Every structure is written in C-alpha cells, then in structure tokens.
Amino acid sequence: MISVIGVRFRYAGKIYYFDPVGIDLKQGEKVIVETARGIECGEVVNTVMEVHESEVVAPLKKVMRKATEEDIQQVETNIEKAKEAYDICLEKINKHQLDMKLIDVEYTFDNNKILFYFTADGRVDFRDLVKDLASVFRTRIELRQIGVRDEAKMMGGIGICGRPLCCNCHLTEFHPVSIKMAKEQNLSLNPTKISGTCGRLMCCLKYEQEAYEDLLKRVPKVDALVKTPHGNGTVIYVSLLEEKVKVKLDNDNDPDLREYRACEVTLIKDVEKQPEPEFDEEELKHLED
C-alpha cells in the first residue's frame, strides 16, 4: 500500500493519483503537479489515502507545491488566452476548409503546449493547420480528436430528464452501455427514447442494470409456463420492479386471470423465443459506440 492524493484537472474529470510528499493538503485546495503533458494545476478531491500499488500508474508523480496566488492568476490568464485561441483556430479551420468541429481549447499551465479538441466523422489531415497555428502561437500545438461522448462532457447541456448531463456533472469515466441493457429494463428500443444528447445510449441505463439483472433471475418472463397455488398457467404480464406477474390459468371451461408475487410461482418452462422487437437491434449497434 502507498499513500496518495487524488487530483482532478477538469470539473467532473478523471481523478489522478499523486505522491503528496508530506505536504498537508485539504480537499478543494489547488496544487501544482507534473503530468505526462507538462506542469499542471489541479484540485485536490481526495486527501491522503492508502491504495494498492496496482491501482497506481508507475512511476508515481509527486506534488510540486501548493498553488500560490500567482499560480491561480496564471490559470485564469490561460483560460482567457484559450478563448482567443479558440476564435483564431476557427478562422484557420475555415481557411483550410477542414471538415472538423472545434470543441474546446486548453493551455497547459506552463504554456508549453496548446491543446485543441475537435470532433470529425473520419480522419482529418490537419498538418497544414498545425503549421499555421504554430506560426501564430509560437509554441507546441496538439490537435486531439475526441468522440461524441467526450464532446457532450465538455460542452454540457440538459438531458431528456430535464437535469444537467450526468457526464458533465459527476461521471468521471464512461462505462460501456449496451442495447441488451435497454431490453432487460423493458425500454422501447426507439433510438430517440434511449439515446442521450450525444446520440449514443444514455449513460443512466447503467445505473440500475445490476438491480434489473438480479430481478430477472427471480421473475419469470412473459409467455413462460408457471405453477401457481391455483394450478398451472401462462404469464401474460410482468411488473418487474414490483416482482409481480399476471397469470392466465389453464382452466378450459373458465379461463382465470390472477396476479401473484414472483415468489409464489414456480417456473415450469421458460420462453423459447422472445417477440420480435419493433426496431432492428443490429441497426441500433451504432448507439453503443
């Protein structure tokens, strides 16, 4: 086990571990650290804690110092410079007629590099653009292509639930989300209803998936043959969250429809084939990217 602190460089961004080297640091304080892309200013989100060595990317970088007033001012200055760089880059993109969408611009703390984040449908030959930008800013230029999920995280917005996007508020990393999750949660496979602002499957499908998987183990499916306290029957309706089923009992003379708790019925024969979905699942695979 080794002692580390957790530092974040963007709001709701990924947390990175650093060696505090004995510096007394509190949550919310700014620190200057050395990263793979240079000297950066980040915020302490986790105070000193013990983690296993396997959780740390070696070699573990050290905290250089607490951020001073001058350091904070430098960060604010870089933010203003980034806004100007954004406008200049837009002009250059139009000049070179490149099929790309500029999302954000970021200066490293020490001004040794400027990062330009963009999205594009395919590969973009931006070599001339980089040369043009380097001649203007006289520093290292890096153009980084990001995905639509990262775009939504950077830009922010309001989801269909009426709340700010989860990725922009609290999700530090993206977790895989699949069409299977939407099916198991009995959601319509209509792309407009299960897609987020980014055009991919909503991240919140992941939140309750574990609970649904547990419920599906205990609750029979629609059309399954089950044994009830009043005889055998076929499940015609399932309320998964309530763990209740409606069963049509096999009484030829008087068909009987009754509701039971899932624990009151016993599965005799499971469903061999599920009804055809309204939307082709293969055509929805692009939503998982």
Image (cartoon, helix red, strand yellow):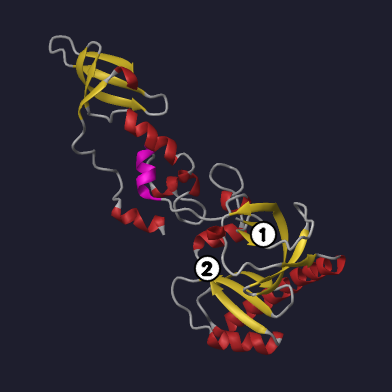
Give the residue type that dot 1 points to: Arg
On screen, residue 274 versus residue 137, left or right, reads left
Within-10-Å neighbours for mark 1: few <14, some 14–19, many 20+ = many
Residue at x 41% of width, y 59% of height: 289
- Does the image show residue 189? no
Residue at x 35% of width, y 56% of height: 285
Query: Residue extending furthest left?
Result: 252
Q: What segment carries the magenta color?
A: 178-186
Q: Quadrant of residue 251?
A: top left
Q: Residue 76 in magenta? A: no
Question: Real-space Cα distance between discs 1 and 2?
Answer: 19 Å
On screen, residue 66 versus residue 153, left or right, reads right
Residue annotated with mark 2: 146
Q: What element carries label 2?
A: loop
Q: Position of residue 195 (x, y in %)?
A: 45, 50
> If the image is split into quadrants, where does the N terminus sit?
bottom right
- Does the image show residue 45? yes
Q: Position of residue 161 (x, y in %)?
A: 55, 41
Q: What element carries label 1?
A: strand
Query: Residue extending furthest front?
Result: 1
On screen, residue 124 versus residue 53, left or right, reads left
Give the camera-side residue of 248 and 88.
248
Residue annotated with mark 1: 8
Residue at x 29% of width, y 14% of height: 258
Give the camera-side residue of 281 and 106.
106
Figure disc tally: 2
Sequence-wise, which precedes: disc 1 or disc 2?
Answer: 1
Q: Residue 181 in magenta? A: yes
